[in-house]
Amino acid sequence: MLNRIILIGRLTRDPELRYTPQGVPVASFSLAVERPYANQAGQRETDFVDCVAWRKLGETVGNHLTKGRLAAVEGRLQIRSYEAQDGTKRRVAEVIADSVQFLDRPKDGQSSPSPSEGSSYGDEEVSLPDDLPF
């Protein structure tokens, strides 16, 4: 069986970085992803996909991505159920990110990982060369 998803889209809001009671970082964010075909009016429709990144990847996403940034997310689809405050059962589909790649430069004034910091792509720390354009 296989459960893999690869998405490329723009963040619809700044990531929400929080920590579990055990101190594990988790970032929640949403990607706007265009569908690969146009509707009858000739316009492309957009899907808004909820994503979650855990641990070091979650911290990196929470500290360096912002609304409007272009990112590639690779992970797995998870569907979970919960009971809302009004007692109704709800289901949520979200992508649990294994890796996130930053595909554009930050706008002026926004933070981004410096080449000396490296950039996290999943559980592995990757050093960036000094001559990258961002």
Image: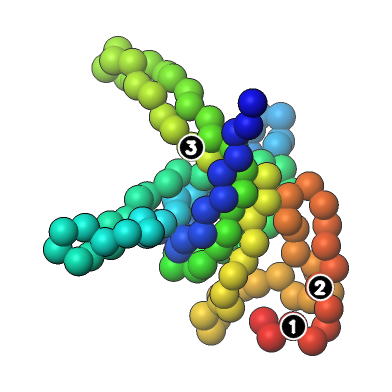
- On the picture, is 33 further left or further right than 21? left
Secondary structure beneath dot 1 equals: loop
Nearest the viewer among 48 and 16 is 48
Local crowd at mark 1 within 10 Å, few (<14), some, or many (≥20)? few
Judged from this view, the residue extending furthest toward the left is: 41
Task: Establish if 58 lies above or below 69.
Answer: above
Q: Quadrant of the N terminus?
A: top right
| Residue 43 visible within the image | yes
Which residue is painted at 22% across and 65% down in the image? Answer: 43
| Circle 2/circle 1 CB separation < 8 Å | yes
Q: How many marks?
A: 3
The residue that mark 3 highlights is 94
Q: Earlier in the sequence, mark 1 or mark 3?
A: 3
Q: CA distance from mark 3 to mark 2?
A: 29 Å
Which of the numbered marks, if any, corresponds to residue 11? none
The residue that mark 1 highlights is 132
Disc 2 residue type (three-letter): Leu
Which of the numbered marks, if any, corresponds to residue 128? 2
Residue 52, percent from left and from top: 56, 42
